[in-house]
């Protein structure tokens, strides 16, 4: 079972109340501490892109790898576009590959271009969990870019802990709680014992202390 919504909203309210007033809207982060996890098995190597019901308030830097009409539409939608020639230029240049991988939060690629993506950027994107979402050549790329603005990426790095940005202070308590639930449901589904593998769940603002969510 996902976390109790009433307890979640209470934790969100406490996080906001405990936060000192700033001139900007602070981000709110989620931390899930897991237990009884075998880090050598698949459940110990969680790596997920999760679409949230509400944007976390951060403008994601989306890079679209496409050609022709899709490339033009992606540019009109405000995304950075890499075409075939751009990818070819990256082959063998590890420094530039790393720069591209670091610069963008998310990548979307026209499916037929995935082999070239693997050749030119795979070594840099793969370890970072940033391999592109493949889409069909006739996909609505504007819709895909908008959809990716609500995506967060979570993964475990050697420790049984999941951390990610889940919202910001300007969002309603309910919106933040619903985002938390979306992450919890996905992680729960990846664990052998589900919610029983959850040891504790915390919320915190970027500049404030953490608040434990009652489970």
Image (cartoon, helix red, strand yellow):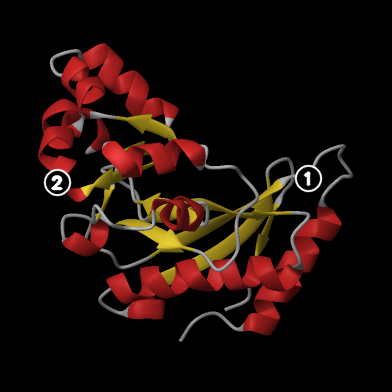
| Label 2 element class | helix
| Label 1 element class | loop
Provide the residue designation for mark 1: 25
Q: Is residue 215 visible?
A: yes
Looking at the picture, how far across and down is residue 162, in whole percent?
Answer: 43, 55
Q: Give the residue at the far front of this rendering.
A: 69
Q: Give the residue at the far bottom of this rendering.
A: 1
Relative to 117, say whether 18 is above or below: below
| Label 2, residues with CA under 10 Å away: few <14, some 14-19, many ≥20 | few
- Name the residue located 48 percent from the left edge and 61 percent from the top edge: 32
- Name the residue located 30 percent from the left edge and 68 percent from the top edge: 36
Provide the residue designation for mark 2: 112
Relative to 63, say whether 168 is above or below: below
Looking at the picture, how far across and down is residue 181, in whole percent?
Answer: 53, 73
Residue 89 or residue 23, whichever sits in front: 89
Relative to 21, say whether 124 is above or below: above
Position of residue 190 in the picture relative to residue 180 (left or right): left
Residue 90 or residue 112, whichever sits in front: 112
Relative to 71, say whether 16 is above or below: below
What is the CA distance from the residue labelled 2 to the residue labelled 1? 41 Å
- Name the residue located 47 percent from the left edge and 58 percent from the top edge: 147
- Name the residue located 59 percent from the left edge and 42 percent from the top edge: 59
């Amino acid at each position: 079972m996902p976390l109790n919504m009433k307890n979640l909203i209470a934790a969100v309210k406490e996080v906001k109340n405990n936060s000192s007033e700033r001139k900007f809207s602070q981000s709110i982060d989620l931390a899930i501490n897991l237990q009884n996890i075998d880090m050598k098995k698949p459940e110990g190597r969680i790596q997920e892109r999760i679409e949230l019901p509400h944007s976390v308030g951060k403008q994601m830097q989306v890079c679209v790898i496409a050609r022709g009409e899709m490339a033009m539409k992606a540019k009109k939608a405000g995304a950075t576009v890499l075409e075939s020639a751009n990818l070819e230029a990256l082959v063998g240049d590890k420094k530039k590959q790393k720069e591209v991988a670091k610069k963008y939060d998310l990548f979307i690629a026209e499916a037929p271009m995935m082999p070239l993506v693997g050749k030119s950027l795979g070594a840099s994107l793969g370890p970072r969990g940033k391999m592109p979402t493949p889409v069909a050549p006739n996909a609505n790329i504007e819709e895909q870019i908008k959809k990716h603005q609500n995506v967060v990426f979570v993964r475990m790095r050697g420790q049984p802990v999941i951390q990610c940005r889940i919202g910001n202070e300007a969002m309603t308590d309910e919106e933040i709680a619903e985002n938390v639930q979306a992450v919890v449901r996905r992680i729960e589904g990846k664990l052998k014992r589900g919610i029983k593998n959850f040891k504790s769940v915390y919320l915190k603002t970027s500049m404030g202390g953490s608040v434990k969510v009652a489970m």
